[in-house]
Image (tube, helix red, strand yellow):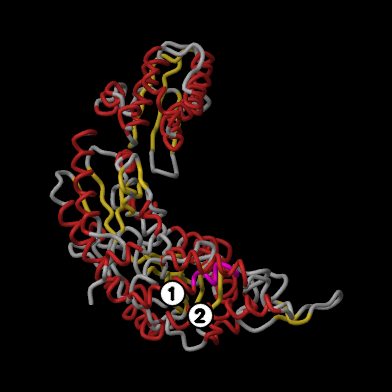
Amino acid sequence: MALNISSIREQFPFLKETVNGQPLIYLDNAASAQKPSRVISRMSRFMESEYANVHRGIHLLSERATAAYEKARTSVATLLNAPREEEVIFTRGTTEAVNLVANTWGRENIRSGDTILLTEMEHHSNLLPWLKLAGDVGAKVEFVPVLENGAALDLESAKRLLATGPKLFAFVHIPNTLGLENPVADLCRWAAESGATTFVDGAQSVGHQPVDVQKLGCDFLACSSHKMCGPSGIGALWGRHELLAAMPPWQYGGEMVDRAYYDKPATFREPPARFEAGTPPILEAAGWAEAIAFLNDTGLDAIREHSVSLANLAAGRLREIEGLRVFGPEIRQSGIVAFSIEGVHAHDVAFFANERGLALRAGHHCAQPLMRKLGSISSSRASFYLYNQQADVDALVGILHEAVAFFR
Amino acid sequence: MDNELYQAVLLQHSKQPRNFGPLEHATHAADGHNALCGDEISVALRIEGDTVAEAKFTGSACAICTASASIMTGEVKGLTCAAAQALAGNFRLLLKDGAGPDLPKKLEVLSGVHQFPQRVKCAALPWETLVSAMKSPAA
């Protein structure tokens, strides 16, 4: 079923903004997505009549806030098809979720001489916490290579490296640069056969297509609200309950403690509370739940199809520009199109595009080692989501032709 | 709009940068990197006595950064290190306010950059790298 784009666009107030008198075209969705009216008004309403701290007060507003916060947990659990709601831990976002697992499960389970397996296409957020852990405990880090031009993960190498028995395989579902989707279910199956625990970075996939942790067969998965039309400042870690239950706390303070004393060790609550020290992102949880409802109403399959088809259209027409190289596979598997243009620096492209109302991303996209390997330290990126339309692709292509003529 | 930032002279410098390439017999060198946008630039100097006798640069950078480096390497040639350092300070003011004391005419082409805060780093990077090169004798 195709999306009703004009009806969707009416629900996004940011589209009324102009740049130098021209309509704003937003193609920086892989960095963060825009917010529909119903998320914005849900958050206002929550602050007006439902807000207080959660899990503490025995009063009306605290009850309302707690109900909304826990309802958000249910929404995320349902979105991911998690077997149990308590398996969803709210974090600040994907980055914090990776750091949480590295600092708890990682420190309990990764020993000197163990191997952590990553891929060459990881965002810094799913790279640096593991490198830090490996450095601290004396573990080895190995990388599944990417194929030429970032066309795919080298699956033969993945199988071979998994067979050597790494303790952990942490990898991205949809990388933020290459326009591809990794075969998560296969990778998790091979990992399980070799006894490796799996951590999936779902920042670019959850909310952009159906993601079912039970079908994927992973052990941990992380995602962020702001990439799926919800507010920034909240995300989630999903983990299999038996793993979470065995993990020590990460941050200490209110909410996560069971019994505290002056003179003997404290005891801690069961997950998810154990991993949610302090006042959580309450307002953000309410907003995220509304965003998830919006995406479900719109249809995740249709959203994926729409974004990918715009990306394919864009990639095809961009390749017609002389000296322009699109990274990743020939046929897009996600809504992301990253490219470099010979003789025109990405930073100039993004500036030139902004002057014409077009928001692009320029730089290394928080994946410096990958961009270095692809031979381009700085590239441009257009990423599509549900409110983008074919006219946006036309504008992108036209502006890039202009930019090439101007700078080259 | 574009024309305020990308003046014709600036585009000329970025398309055909002066003093671009490796410097043989460099006595001082440093690398500069803008983590936000990926500009990478290396500045190499031959310092004789206390004078910058030769200055060249290499790297991959945007039009603003490349043009800034192209003009800079021409301007500092023949200056004492102290004078080059002072010029770098005055250039910083140009990027901040759109004007600075004792600036050679050729640098005026970069006076528009101060209106575009997100591009100030691009123009500043070569000069920051120059200052750090003057403090870094080549091994």
Q: Is residue B128 above or below residue A108?
A: above
Dividing the picture into quarters, in which one does residue A299 lie? bottom left
Residue A285 part of the magenta-drawn span: yes
Give the residue displayed 35% in from the left and 31% down from the top: B64
Determine whether, in the image, residue A342 is placed left or right of residue A164.
Answer: left
Q: Which residue is mark 2?
A: A239
Residue A80 visible, this angle: yes
Quarter of the N terminus of chain A within the rendering: bottom left
Farthest residue, direction right: A263
Label located before the other in sequence (2 or 1): 2
CB-based contact (under 8 Å), mark 2 and mark 1:
no
Residue A185 percent location from the top left of the image: 33, 80
Q: Mark 2 against mark 1, which lies toward the viewer? A: 1
Determine whether, in the image, residue A60 is placed left or right of residue B39.
Answer: right
Give the residue displayed 42% in from the left and 84% down from the top: A81
Dividing the picture into quarters, in which one does residue B121 lie? top left
Which secondary structure lies at badge 1?
A: helix
Q: Specify the segment rendered in magenta.
A: A282-288
Count of residue discs = 2
Q: Is residue A3 above or below residue A195?
A: above
Discs 2 and 1 lie in a common subunit: yes
Mark-to-mark CA distance, 2 and 1: 20 Å
Subunit under mark 2: A
Which SS does the magenta portion mostly show?
A: helix
Query: Which dot marks residue A319?
Result: none
Residue A163 visible, this angle: no
Viewer-nearest residue: A328 or A38: A38
Which secondary structure lies at badge 2?
A: strand
Badge 2 amino acid: Gly
Mark 2: give few (<14), some (14-19) or many (20+) Cα within 10 Å. Answer: many
Mark 1: give few (<14), some (14-19) or many (20+) Cα within 10 Å. Answer: many
